[in-house]
Amino acid sequence: MSLTLNDVEKIAKLSRLTLSDDEKNSTLEKLNAVFELVEKMQTVNTDGVEPMAHPHEVALRLREDTVTESDHATEYLAVAPEVRNRMYIVPHVIEE
């Protein structure tokens, strides 16, 4: 698949970009190079290759799941102008 200059102009318009003729041509070359690379990658035989979460064999560092901070909600809510059911009440700003 390769793009045309018309495709680049449509993409620029949708992206709200103003491109000069040189920029359009440069972008066209770069995008087509990306599509060529993708096409080459699609030709690689991946039969029998297991999907990987990470390119390197890495063991996760596990730590004890413990609470390290105390609950400060009461302190934070105490300075709020209005609170109901542990929630901050704010002025209505969106009209219905």
Image: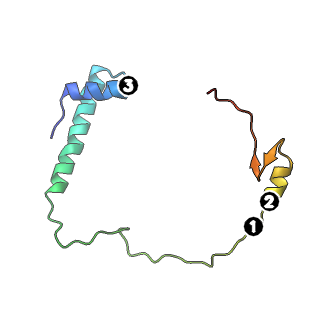
Q: Residue furthest front?
A: 96
Q: Name the amino acid type tagged 2.
A: His
Q: Which residue is disc 1 drawn over?
A: 69
Circle 2/circle 1 CB separation < 8 Å: yes
Q: Which residue is disc 3 drawn over?
A: 17
Q: Secondary structure at mark 3?
A: loop
Disc 2 or disc 3, which is closer to the eye? 2
Q: Which residue is disc 2 drawn over?
A: 72
- Distance from the alpha carbon under mark 3 to that under mark 1: 47 Å
Badge 3 density bin: few <14, some 14–19, many ≥20, Cα 10 Å: few
Quarter location, residue 48: bottom left
Tell me what residue is drawn at x 33 percent, y 69 percent: 52
Relative depth, front residue between 37 and 91:
91
Answer with left or right where residue 65 lies relative to residue 54.
right
Quarter location, residue 92: top right
For residue 78, above or below residue 24:
below
Relative depth, front residue between 40 and 16:
16
